[in-house]
Image (spheres, rainbow, N blue to C red):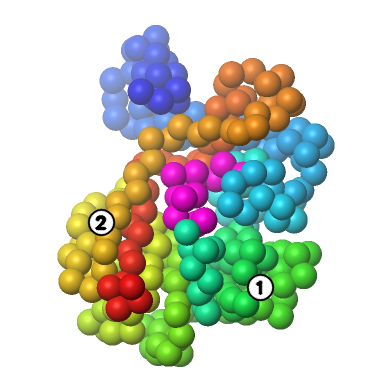
Amino acid sequence: MSWHLKIKNKLIEDLSLQDSNEISQLNNALRLLAKHRSLLIQNTVIQNSGLTVQQGPLAGLAFIKQSAEGCHVAKLIGCYEQPLHSHIEEAIEENYESIINIGCAEGYYAVGMARKLNETKTYAYDINENAQRACIQLAEENGVTDRVQVGAVFSHHDFQKFKVSRTLVFCDIEGAESELLDPSLAPELKSMDIIVEAHEVERPGIVQLLSSRFEDSHSISLVEDNGQRYLDPMPAWFMNFSHLDQLLAVWEWRSGPTPWLVMKSNASA
């Protein structure tokens, strides 16, 4: 059982909470307090290590002071979405001609991978204007503005622009992947490799839905996340944190399961 569930269950027991609304309010309060503490930890991390990603497949990326959304510390440390790291490394080795990052946020992956791939053009899309500006800023700070193109909405029709290139689709769009990643509406997807975060917590059954759509055209791997993170090497300043702060430093603010589907096109193979 994760640390926050242990704390919540202990509080429910001590406070004799039985009403579902009271328990929900407690859960929301705990998340808010944990996020606030994460922001304080973030300041300490920046003071000790600056704004360079420390480890992982995107190590060396010159990052920004605040993510466009979600957690920030885990990205700086380099343990963000750690179960996916081997697949990110494999994607970097593939040397795709194009990478489409849909739901790019501040560009952690879009810019991070462009920095590693000198011949690859990255197309970063996000409907949040603040995220678009942050992605442009991140590309500038890493000297890859010539290879990172930032846009807003990405539709089924847009996949046609990439049908003649070796393309990776990297998708994280908070459940809307069920509408966008549909080969019946965008047949070009059948020849593209895809890494997609499946938001089971918001769309129960989405893993099965996407798997059924691509099982004939792709080799599919399900990557799950138990929430554990490992740092190698362990930063000296990290060891000075309390155990709770160490947990919060690598916490990614997820409210439930968000496994990934890594789908390799049979055509590209």
Within the image, what quadrant is residue 22 found in?
Answer: top left
Within the image, what quadrant is residue 13 found in?
Answer: top left
**x, y percentage for residue 123?**
56, 77
Residue 146 vertical placement versus 55 (above, below): below
Depth check, front residue: 236 or 233: 233
Q: Main secondary structure of the magenta part?
A: helix
Query: Which residue: 39% across, 14% down?
Result: 10
Query: Which residue: 28% across, 73% down?
Result: 266
**Residue 79 drawn in magenta:** yes
**x, y percentage for residue 264?**
33, 67
Residue 260 seen in this snapshot: yes
9 left or right, relative to 149 = left
196 left or right, relative to 79 = left
Residue to which mark 2 is pinned: 207
Magenta-tinted stretch: 78-89
**Residue 103 drawn in magenta:** no
What residue type is disc 2 on? Val
Label 2: few (<14), some (14–19) or many (≥20) C-alpha neighbours in 10 Å: many
**x, y percentage for residue 247?**
55, 27
Residue to which mark 1 is pinned: 118
Q: CA distance from mark 1 to mark 2?
A: 33 Å
> Please, what secondary structure does the residue beneath circle 1 have?
loop
Label 1: few (<14), some (14–19) or many (≥20) C-alpha neighbours in 10 Å: few
Q: Residue furthest top?
A: 14
248 left or right, relative to 179 = right
What residue type is disc 1 on? Asn
**x, y percentage for residue 149?**
62, 79
